Structure formats: structure tokens, C-alpha cells
Amino acid sequence: MNIINVLLLKRNIKEDFISQLLNISSKNIYKRINKLRKFGYLILYAPKEGYSLVRNIGPLNKYEIKASINENLDICKKIKCYKKINSTQTLTKEFAEKGFKEGLIVFSDIQTKGYGRNKDMWESNIGGLWFSILLRPKIPPNAVYKLLFLFSNAIKNIVEENYNIDCEMKWPNDILVYGKKLAGTIIEMSVDSNNILEWIVIGIGINVNNNLSEYLETTAISIKSILKREINITKFISLLLKKIDILYKDFINETKQ
């Protein structure tokens, strides 16, 4: 358990309780709280009441995501979060070439050059969910594209089961609601000279709480516009990654047989 897990337990948590639970000094508590504040957390303190996590008012960050998942996932061993980059897909491929291990996930609040299949531009504004996952499965290259269907199916299941939104899959990688695009996936890979798979990078884009440009309103849709409210995007991430992790493990086990 880390300090975020403790702060998420309830409001008004006394310092001595945190110290006893995590076995750290008051000085270390203060240092960790200040570090979280720099990431955008609004954490209040009152001598009699203790600490209260009001809300994360900043961008996505790995501490809240890890706390929400609260278990070990094969697909999520290391998290990197950015406020704005050109593309999570581009950056994750660079990390793959540098030798990063399986289970790296790169998130960005904004992408300036996000793209989907056929390099089509994907508008990636604040409030949406834009991320890429680095995987290194020991499978034949011709089995890779089955993962595209599995990941898209995971998105469909989470949206339907947890937010009561009926979705349809448009082969091979789009999730539609009312005929409009809610989410998309892309998969890219590297194969060596012996036709052995080196890495896979799967990119996922989901219109969650983002406002869509006027020219996209006829072709795209967001969860926010469907429900007429914003949802907790960190909780959504947790649900989705847990689902993907299960499907990925099953896929690897079946492919090995």
C-alpha cells in the first residue's frame, strides 16, 4: 500500500494513522504529500482533521492509476504519463527500440499528431483517453493481428457492462455507438531478419470526456456526450486494463498450445 491508497480510503486521515500504516515518519509523509501536490492533487490539511484528498485536478498520473488498479498486471508494469506529446504510439515504439520491457504503458492528456490505421489523424484533446502498450509476446507474427480484435472487444465490453452503452464493432478496429466512432485501436510491430517477433505496440484512443470539434460531431461521439456527464477516467482505465490483461493472458496461453 502507498500513500495514495491511504488517502483514497476516506477523508480526514490523521498523520499518525498514515505513519503507523506505512511505517514512515511525519517528515516523509510531508515530502510525499508535496510530491503528489506537484502532480496536480488537491490535498488539504487541518491540524485536528488531518489530510484530505479532495481531487486530482491535474493530468493523468501514474500514482492514481496504480492505486486504482491495485494489483499486478502483466500488461502494466511501468507507466509513463505526459501532458502533451506528438503521439503515444510514436514514443512507445521509440521506447521499444531502446529495449524497454513488456508492460510499458504510455499515456498522454493531449496528442498533437495522434493517428489510427492508415495513418489517419486522430483528434486527441484533453479529456480523452490516449495510450499505447508495449508487449513482447513469443508468438508467430501472423498471430499478432488477433490481438487487435481482443483489445477492441475489451473496450466494447467495458463500455457496455459498466456504462450501459450499446456498442458495435466495425472490423477490424473501431467501436461505434449510433454509427459514430467512439474508440479505435492500432497495432504495429517489429520482426527481425529471422521472422521472429521483437515487439508489438498497441495504441488505443477513446473519446471519454473530451469535447469533439464541430466537424467531427457527425462521425464521432464521446462517452460524455452519450451520458450527459463526465465519468471518472482513472476508474475507466483501471477497468479496461484489468480486462485487457485477462484477455491477453488467455490469448498467450492458447497461442502456445
Image (tube, rainbow, N blue to C red):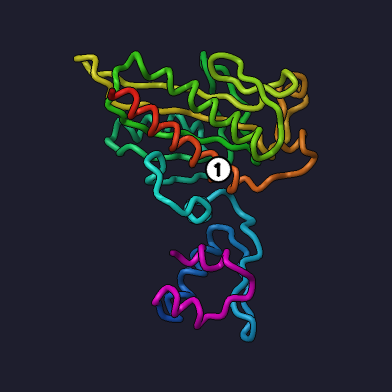
**Above or below: residue 130 compared with residue 64:** above
The residue lying furthest to the right in this view is 228
Could you say where residue 166 lies in the image, as x and y percent from the top left? 70, 27
The residue lying furthest to the left in this view is 194
Residue sitting nearer the eye, 47 or 249: 249
Could you say where residue 154 lies in the image, as x and y percent from the top left? 54, 31
Residue drawn at the location 71% of the way across and 21% of the way down: 180
- Residue 74 vs residue 154: left or right? left
Three-letter residue code for mark 1? Leu
Residue drawn at the location 56% of the way across and 48% of the way down: 60
Q: How many marks?
A: 1
Residue sitting nearer the eye, 173 or 94: 173
The range drawn in magenta is 1-23
Residue drawn at the location 80% of the way across and 39% of the way down: 228
Residue drawn at the location 64% of the way across and 86% of the way down: 48
Q: Quadrant of residue 127?
A: top right
The secondary structure type at the circle numbered 1 is: helix
- Quadrant for the C terminus, please: top left
